[in-house]
Amino acid sequence: MSIGVGIIGAGVMGADHARIIARQVAGAHLVAISDADEDRARAIAAETGAKRAVNDPLGVIADPEVGAVLIASPDSTHADFTIACIRAGKPVLCEKPLAPTAAEGMRVIDAELSAGLRLVQLGFMRRFDPGYTEMKGLLESGRYGEALAFHCVHRNATAPAYFDSVAAIVNSCVHEVDIARHVLSAELSSVRVFRAKKSKLAHFDDPMLVVFETDKGQLVDVELFLNAQYGYDVKGELICETGTISFGPALNTEVRSSGVTATGLAADWRPRFSAAYRIQNQAWIESITGGSPVGSSAWDGYVATTVTDAGVRSLKTGETVAIAYEKRPLLYT
Ligand code: ISE
């Protein structure tokens, strides 16, 4: 059986997902792609063999040939489109974040609870990255004792013009929020955002250092530097009682020449996390055709927005902000 997939959004991520579904995922085919810019949708549909290109996101969700929906439209539209998928009873893989704020994210939780069924997977692809997966496995082996701290680095070459300091937290740092909860099997209990000396090449507070405490007493620090110029660079190092666990950049061809050793760096997150996206999308399709839900749930997405809300408050006040959320365990324990 092959699942007909509809994609909402044909921008950078929508186009990437369309290519992955068309070329790298078994058990799925592309039915429709929608974008506010119909020409853009048409170009990706032609490239990937999707049957229909439209400017009608709700039409894609209602399309009887669409069995599952992938949302890659702007962040502010994620919650509404996800709720429409839940109401239509269709499984949905929604790009992160679930919503720009926790209040908006809670509407998705309420919709899923009324449906009484987990239909939402959040596109926190790092949970499927081989580096993070191995890190979590090694930690859980117990060989290195308990994790005490987690150093994270999140650098982009340049941030888009529409980005600001809040977006750096809500759209970028949200990845570390989710992956830290996942790798450490812990909840983040407080956050403090520090602004470093601002780069002359940045149009907002960049870099920043974001420091979280977990409910297990661990520290998670994230260097967010979204105008680092030299390339895309994501690192993680777990500090455990008897050792450390880290992973290298995923593009690992090494060139030695003229007295220098060089390894390539990705230009952005798509090549760096290409394996993660492929594994994530395949796992999503398999979870629909017979397995149980995988990856981050709507609840994980909601918790992440609660944490980024607190991060934004800390950014504005300069203070440590406690993180608290109302637990609605029904579908999510
Ligand atoms: C972007 O939206 C992503 O999701 C990337 O994975 C992340 O690294 C980047 O910082 C975000 O802006």
Image (cartoon, rainbow, N blue to C red):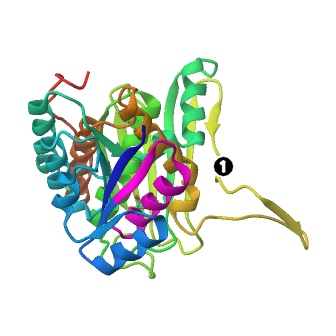
Q: Nearer the viewer, residue 146 or 291?
A: 291
Q: Position of residue 188 (x, y in %)?
A: 32, 36
Q: Does residue 188 lie above or below 330 as drawn?
A: below
Identify the image quadrant of residue 161. Answer: bottom left
Question: The residue under label 1 is which amino acid type?
Answer: Gly
- Looking at the rendered image, the quarter that the N terminus falls into is top left
- Looking at the rendered image, the quarter that the C terminus falls into is top left
* Residue at (44, 51) in percent of width and height: 222
Q: Does residue 146 lie above or below 32 as drawn?
A: above
At numbered mark 1, what does the secondary structure look like: helix, strand or loop? loop
Identify the image quadrant of residue 49. Answer: bottom left
Q: Position of residue 294 (x, y in %)?
A: 39, 32
- 167 left or right of 202 in image: left
- 92 left or right of 48 in image: left
* Residue at (46, 37) in percent of width and height: 283
Provide the residue designation for mark 1: 248
- 312 left or right of 24 in image: left
The magenta span reads 10-31
Residue 242 sits inside the magenta stretch: no
Q: Label 1 crowding class (10 Å Cα cut-off): few <14, some 14-19, many 20+?
A: few
* Residue at (83, 64) in percent of width and height: 255
Q: Quadrant of ligand 1?
A: bottom left
Q: Position of residue 117 (x, y in %)?
A: 20, 29
Residue situated furthest right in the rendering: 258
Residue 29 sits inside the magenta stretch: yes
